[in-house]
Image (spheres, rainbow, N blue to C red):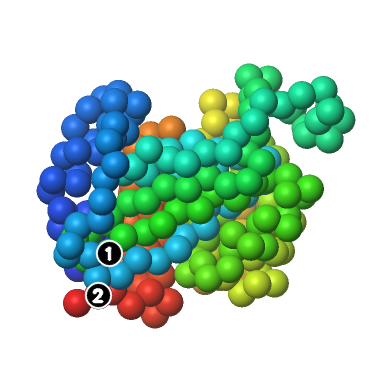
Amino acid sequence: MVSANFAEAARFADADFAEANFATADPAAAVPTRPEYLPSTVQGAVKILITGPFGVGKTTLVGSLSEIAPLRTEETMTAAGAGVDDLTGRPDKTTTTVALDFGRITLNPRLALYLFGTPGQQRFWPLWDDLSRGALGAIALVDARRIEESFDVLGRLEEQRIPFAIAVNSFPDSPSYPEEELRVALDLLPEVPILRCDARDRRAAYDLLIDFVSHLHSTSVLELPQ
């Protein structure tokens, strides 16, 4: 069971952080324009993967969460990817991550999370293996319109024994499935949380991260600094 005390502390421990990141209605305006250094109060940092199949919203989620300008390695998609990268339902997608996305968020005055977004295509999986090394856990984004595309990523997380939670990303034409149907379709163990989010929304992204960290804490994967 998730610790309510921890969740409340994580949400409200740093009022300055909350104000800086969520006071503006324009997500782009909330991205820092200068280097932001870790507070001296930070006692620990952990690595979290943001993973999922191609075009599921990983880059968007890292950008929504990061308190620093995120590092992105996006390249313009070319004709060489035709027939390889399925753009069905994603007609406006013109770039793809070829290495990683990186961001950082100071969750509370004592704990920082380093966010590593993985590339989605199988041809970049050698990089995926390197990025996953040392990760404490993973948020696996799922597109409910294309559930089957998530199988390979979830299989790799299970093979590497990385604790993970499912985050069903919201798209305008996404069907709404009950949690149990999603659990069966994804062949998930009972202890794997199924969460929902809109990766474009900073508040929703932050709530997702809090729920995930609370899950890691409740299962003793993450020991919080005192």
C-alpha distance separating marks 1 and 2: 7 Å
Q: Quadrant of residue 224?
A: bottom left
In the foreground, 172 or 46: 46
Q: Is residue 144 visible?
A: no
Q: Residue at 38% across / 74% down in the picture?
A: 222
In the picture as drawn, the residue positioned furthest to the right comes out as 83
Task: Residue 44: give x, y in percent of width and height.
Answer: 30, 70
**Residue type, numbered disc 2:** Pro
The residue positioned 51% from the left and 53% from the top of the image is 116
Disc 1 is placed on an element classified as strand
Q: Residue at x 13, y 45 (%)?
A: 16
Tell me: 112 left or right of 144: left
**Image side of residue 37 versus residue 188, left or right:** left
Residue 20: image quadrant is top left
Crowding at dot 1, Cα within 10 Å, few <14 / some 14-19 / many 20+, comes out as many
53 vs 16, nearest the viewer: 16
Q: How many marks?
A: 2
Can residue 14 be seen at all in this image of the molecule?
yes
Give the residue type that dot 1 points to. Leu
Sequence-first disc among 1 and 2: 1
- 57 or 70: nearer the viewer: 70
Label 2 crowding class (10 Å Cα cut-off): few <14, some 14-19, many 20+?
Answer: few
Question: Considering depth in this image, is 117 or 169 the residue closer to the camera?
Answer: 117
Which element carries disc 2, helix, strand or loop? loop
Labelled pair 1, 2 in contact (Cβ < 8 Å): yes
In the rendered image, residue 113, in percent from the top left (x then y), is placed at 37, 59
Q: Position of residue 65 (x, y in %)?
A: 37, 44
Q: Which residue is mark 2?
A: 225
Mark 1 lies on residue: 111
Q: Is residue 26 above or below residue 180?
A: above
Report the residue that reaches farthest toward the left.
15
